[in-house]
């Protein structure tokens, strides 16, 4: 099961890289260097990519399962492994096997989660012994979503995604819809019409159901398939929202049976699945 802890923690293990949902996402400002200042709540769900690692004596980092259209040297899994290798002056190599279950350009954090799992797994397998905060600092150089996956807790996140306040979230089932489109994050954040001055809130002020996604209107305007999927879901679950910069949209249900009933109505051509909210990342305790 995607959300189950990895055991035993060794070279034979399958290491999960779970998806996240943004339960809200506000853009509260922009730094001089162009990075956007965000507030969001990250929730991990039990749909995940899977990674497996093989030691190499030659010190090379090799992605045994290249992603079509992505050069290996640009792949976040390779970059994460090399970053850890350089940061720890390591001489060990690794072959990385990645099974992709999360869509690219879906707003579920798949690439970032993969990178975080590489950092966590190789820190353990190579016995480099970096503390989790040190891995988080490495992660932020790979992407804004990587640190929270390393952090391992459902969190209210701030800044560029590197400051966390833990949140306890109730059990819930999510219906996630994936329109047949990839949404490039850079295009959404670079849009001139993107709101960039939503008033910030204190973490203690947030409650489930509070907030919206500032990126949603931009993505819906530029990618009609996202707007259509969201409208379909909102008609059945008014609290439906886009996650991240899209393309996936989701709705929360207190009971799996309710989510399953909506999934059963899904029209042809629109992909969707059910996912359970996780209390923490499956690798939170390594």
Image (cartoon, rainbow, N blue to C red):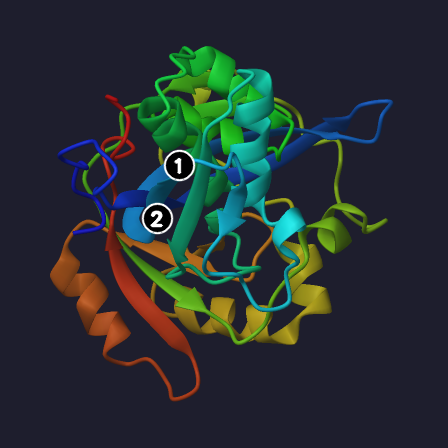
Q: Position of residue 39 (x, y in %)?
A: 57, 28
| Circle 2 residue | 51
Label 2 sits on a secondary structure element that is strand
Q: Residue furthest bottom?
A: 268
- What residue do we see at 51% from left, 48% from top? 62
Residue 196, picture quadrant: top right
Q: Is residue 203 left or right of residue 254?
A: right
Which quadrant does the C terminus fall into? top left
- Where disc 1 sits, the SS reads helix
Give the camera-side residue of 129 and 260: 129
Against 260, residue 213 (above or below) is: above
Q: Which residue, given by chain and number where applicable, does mark 1 sit on?
A: 117
**Quick check: 263 above or below 149?**
below
Q: Residues within 10 Å of mark 2 (few under 14, many from 20)?
A: many
Q: For residue 11, say whether it is visible.
A: yes
- Of the two numbered discs 2 and 1 on the same chain, state the one appearing first in sequence: 2
- Picture coordinates of residue 9 (x, y %)? 20, 31
Left or right of 123 in this view: 169: left
| Residue depicted at 55% across the width and 62% down the height | 247
């Amino acid at each position: 099961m995607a959300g189950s802890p990895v055991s035993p923690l060794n070279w034979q293990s399958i290491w999960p890289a779970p998806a996240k949902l943004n339960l809200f996402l506000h853009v509260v400002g922009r730094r001089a260097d162009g990075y956007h200042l965000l507030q969001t709540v990250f929730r991990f769900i039990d749909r995940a990519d899977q990674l497996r690692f093989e030691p190499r004596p030659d010190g090379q980092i090799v992605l045994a399962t290249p992603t079509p259209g992505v050069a290996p040297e640009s792949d976040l899994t390779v970059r994460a492994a090399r970053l850890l290798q350089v940061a720890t002056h390591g001489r060990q190599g690794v072959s990385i096997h990645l099974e992709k279950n999360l869509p690219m350009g879906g707003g579920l954090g798949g690439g970032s989660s993969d990178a975080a799992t590489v950092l966590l797994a190789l820190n353990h397998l190579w016995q480099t012994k970096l503390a989790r905060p040190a891995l988080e600092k490495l992660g932020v150089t790979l992407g804004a979503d990587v640190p929270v996956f390393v952090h391992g807790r459902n969190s209210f996140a701030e800044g560029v995604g590197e400051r966390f306040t833990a949140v306890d979230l109730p059990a819930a089932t999510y219906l996630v819809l994936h329109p047949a489109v990839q949404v490039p994050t850079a295009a959404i954040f670079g849009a001139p019409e993107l709101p960039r001055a939503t008033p910030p809130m204190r973490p203690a002020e947030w409650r489930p159901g509070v907030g919206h996604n500032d990126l949603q209107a931009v993505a819906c305007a530029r990618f009609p398939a996202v707007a259509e999927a969201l409208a379909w879901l909102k008609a059945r679950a008014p609290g439906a929202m886009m996650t991240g910069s899209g393309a996936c949209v989701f709705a929360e249900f207190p009971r799996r049976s309710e989510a399953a009933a909506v999934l059963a109505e899904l029209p042809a051509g629109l992909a969707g699945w059910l996912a359970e909210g996780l209390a923490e990342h499956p690798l939170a305790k390594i």
